[in-house]
Image: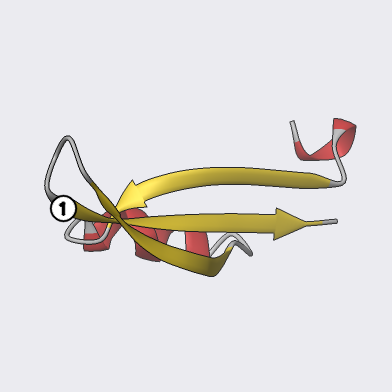
Amino acid sequence: MKLKHDKLQLSVYEKNEAAISFYQNRGFKLVKKEIDQEAGAADCLMEWDA
């Protein structure tokens, strides 16, 4: 997937620390935190750049 794209974005709930760590270890950076109104939980937007 990374070979075909210059940028990838995904969102992960802030309390899912294992997922955040997993993506950070693969080069994703935390871009923004927002509150997911439906879930009532903090949502982290993460991004990987080529």
Q: Residue at x 58, y 59 (%)?
A: 26
Q: Quadrant of residue 4?
A: top right
Residue 10 horizontal side relative to residue 11, left or right: right
Residue 15 image offset from top left, x and y in percent: 17, 60
Q: Residue at x 52, y 43 (%)?
A: 10
The answer to which of 7 and 19 lies nearer the viewer is: 7
- Toward the left, the furthest residue is 40
Q: Residues within 10 Å of mark 1 (few under 14, many from 20)?
A: few
Vertically, is 45 above or below 1?
Answer: below
The answer to which of 22 and 35 lies nearer the viewer is: 35
- Toward the front, the furthest residue is 37
Residue 31 image offset from top left, x and y in percent: 56, 67
The answer to which of 32 and 4 lies nearer the viewer is: 32
Name the residue type under label 1: Ala
Q: Residue at x 25, y 61 (%)?
A: 14
Vertically, is 23 above or below 32?
Answer: above
Residue 32 image offset from top left, x and y in percent: 49, 66
Residue 7 horizontal side relative to residue 26, left or right: right
Q: Residue at x 51, y 69 (%)?
A: 30
Dividing the image into 4 quarters, which one contains the N terminus? top right
Residue 44 image offset from top left, x and y in percent: 39, 58
Q: Which residue is mark 1?
A: 41
Vertically, is 10 above or below 48?
Answer: above
